[in-house]
Each structure stands twice: as C-alpha cells, then as structure tokens.
Image: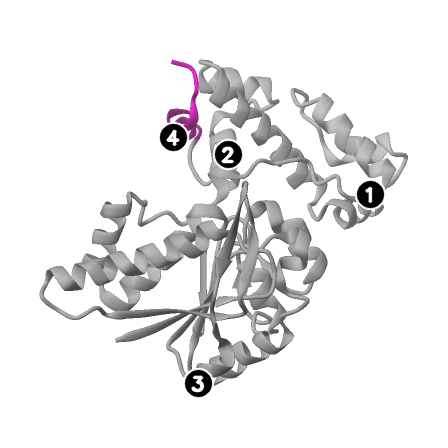
C-alpha cells in the first residue's frame, strides 16, 4: 500500500486540484478493487483545519494535524490563492515538517501554485520546477534564484515533482499513478476521468500578456512599439536606435525589465498575434505568417513550434473557433 498525504496549508485553498487529485487516486483504487485486490492508495488529509467562503456558502475541512503523521510515502501540495501569500506565511512549521519527511525518504509533489509552498521549503534550489504560467511573475519575484520553466507541465528530480497549472496539474497525479502502479492503471484513470495522459507542455495554453509589470517606462514604450508594428521585420538594432542606445546596453536593460531578450520578445509578440489569428479566422498559414512579419515559412513553423509546442497547423486545428 502507498500512503499519500495531501497537505492543507494555512491559506485559501483552490479546491479543484485537491479534489481532482483525490479522484485520480480513488479511480486507481477502483481499478484494484475490480481486479479483486485491496486498494493500493491510502489517502489522507493533513495540515490545518480549513474554513473559507465558496460562492454563496462555506467550504470546511476538519483535518488531521500534520504532527500526528510520522511517516508517509508521498506528500501532495495542492494549489493556494496568491492574494493570500499562496499559504506560505503561516505555514513555516508545516514546511519544516515537509523538509524533514523528504530527508527521511518521502517524495513530495506540488500541483499548480502549490509549487510556491514547495519552493518555500528550500528543496527546489537545484532542480527545474513548474507552476501555472499566470503565476510565473509572482514566483520569480519571490524565488528569483530558482529555475522556473513555465512551458513544462511536469518536472521530476530526486523525489521532487512539480506540475503546471489548473486541471493540467492532474497529469502529474496520473504520472505518479503510472510510476507507482503501472501504465494499465494510469490508462484506466485517464479514460474514466477523460484526462490526456501524455500531455507534457503548457505552451499551447499560455497567453502572452507582454510582461509589462515593471517600472521602466522607456522599455514599456518599446514594447508598445513592437506590438504596433507586428507586421514589420524588426531588429534589435532598430529598437536600440529607437531608444538612442547602443545594442548591448539596450539588450541588458530590456532583459532586466521583461526577463526576455529583445529578439525573444519580438518572437513571442508575433507568435501570440499568429495564435489569435489562427483561433479566430480561416486564414491560411502563409497569410498569417506574412501578417506577423515573417517571410520564410520554414523559419516561421520552427519558431511557432518552439514557442507554442505544436505546429501552426495543429494549433489551428485544435483551437480554431470558426465553423
């Protein structure tokens, strides 16, 4: 039997990842029962009692104190709201307990913004990690030294697991079920819950919002200039001259403000414009390519796939809203 402890921190819980994770493990147990075997996963909630508003009612959990659990095979950290510090501020003792358990051999996994809690333990210092792409700016502000990879849905390193955002974080739970119980059990959970078992990237779902949450007005003006000239073949040299700066200093200042190089930023803006065109029009790939300032179809396809994680054609087929 595998002991799974879902840790409830002292914050405002996002219930979806909690109940989604429980359901995946319960479906795995259902598979074992159908085979005439005992349940494989013992699932328990630990941490602090929770009471919070949910729509027009109240959501409440009475939970076993984490101190009462001396050994568990897996600790799962669900998602918490960023307006309440992701559950970090009041959970220091709980996070110390997580660290102690990990050092005794317990594996630890975080779902969506639960990665903030895992990062606060200090255990992610030497490993890539993932969280919801919308929380990336908050994460980098709190943990600038960590290797956040927003395109990833799952990361794994020495018994530490992190997952991307929302319901896609359940791909990590499926991954853990497959690791512990095998492919057949994971496929059963995937089919019953209608989850895509082999998704490995958040990239197709990321909305690029321009990374303008900084105080450098000159760089913000350049960002707006790029957005207003999507169809032009912009170069870093042109943008540097536009700011009356040399390329090296401009590039350094731009990256400090946006976390991206000017060349990467130009690509992201153009690809985002292409994505929106594929979603809302019936235009062909070449038409969209020219609209966003590319003249080489091979280069456009390569850049689009690098940023989005799928080809322009696949993206259009998946997300196009035009009947």
Name the residue carrying label 4: 314
First to last magenta residue range: 312-323
Q: Which label lies toward us, 3 or 1? A: 3
Q: In this view, does 222 lie above or below 75?
A: above
Q: Which colour scheme is used?
A: one colour
Q: Which label lies toward us, 2 or 3? A: 3
Percent across and percent down for residue 151 are 51, 48
Task: Please give the name of the residue rendered at 49% of the width and 18% of the height, measured from the top-left corner.
Answer: 280
Name the residue carrying label 2: 304
- Residues at circles 2 and 4 in contact by the CB criterion of under 8 Å: no
Secondary structure beneath label 1: helix
Alpha carbons under labels 3 and 1: distance apart: 54 Å
Residue 250's disc is: 1
Residue 124's disc is: none
Alpha carbons under labels 3 and 4: distance apart: 49 Å
Name the residue carrying label 3: 70
Q: Which label lies toward us, 2 or 4? A: 4
Percent across and percent down for residue 288 are 52, 19
Alpha carbons under labels 2 and 4: distance apart: 11 Å
Q: Which label lies toward us, 3 or 4? A: 3
Q: Is residue 289 left or right of residue 139?
A: left
Using the rendered view, name the quadrant where residue 12 is placed.
bottom right
């Amino acid at each position: 039997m595998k002991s799974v402890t879902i840790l409830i921190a002292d914050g405002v819980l996002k219930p979806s990842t909690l109940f989604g994770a429980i359901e995946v493990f319960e479906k795995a147990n259902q598979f074992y029962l159908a085979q005439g075997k005992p349940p494989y996963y013992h699932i328990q909630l630990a941490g602090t009692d929770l009471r919070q508003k949910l729509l027009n009612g109240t959501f409440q959990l009475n939970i076993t104190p984490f101190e009462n659990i001396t050994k568990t095979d897996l600790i799962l950290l669900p998602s918490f709201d960023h307006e309440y510090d992701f559950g970090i501020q009041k959970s220091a003792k709980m996070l110390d307990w997580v660290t102690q358990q990990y050092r005794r051999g317990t594996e630890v996994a975080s779902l969506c913004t639960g990665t903030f809690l895992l990062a606060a333990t200090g255990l992610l210092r030497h490993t890539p990690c993932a969280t919801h792409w919308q929380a990336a700016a908050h994460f980098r502000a709190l943990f600038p030294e960590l290797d956040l990879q927003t395109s990833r849905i799952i990361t794994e390193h020495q018994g530490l697991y992190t997952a991307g955002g929302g319901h896609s974080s359940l791909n990590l739970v499926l991954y853990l079920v497959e690791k512990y119980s095998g492919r057949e059990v994971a496929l059963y959970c995937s089919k019953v819950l209608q989850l895509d078992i082999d998704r490995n990237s958040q990239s197709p779902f990321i909305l690029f919002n321009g990374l303008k949450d900084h105080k450098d007005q000159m760089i913000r003006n350049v960002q707006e200039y790029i957005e207003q000239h999507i169809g032009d073949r912009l170069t870093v040299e042109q943008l540097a001259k536009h700011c009356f700066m040399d390329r090296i200093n401009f590039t350094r200042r731009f990256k400090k403000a946006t976390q991206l190089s000017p060349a990467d930023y130009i690509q992201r803006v153009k690809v985002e414009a292409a994505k929106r065109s594929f979603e809302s029009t019936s235009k062909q790939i070449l038409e969209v390519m020219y609209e966003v300032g590319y003249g080489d179809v091979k280069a456009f396809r390569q850049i689009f796939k690098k940023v989005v994680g799928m080809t322009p054609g696949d993206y259009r087929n998946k997300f196009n809203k035009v009947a």
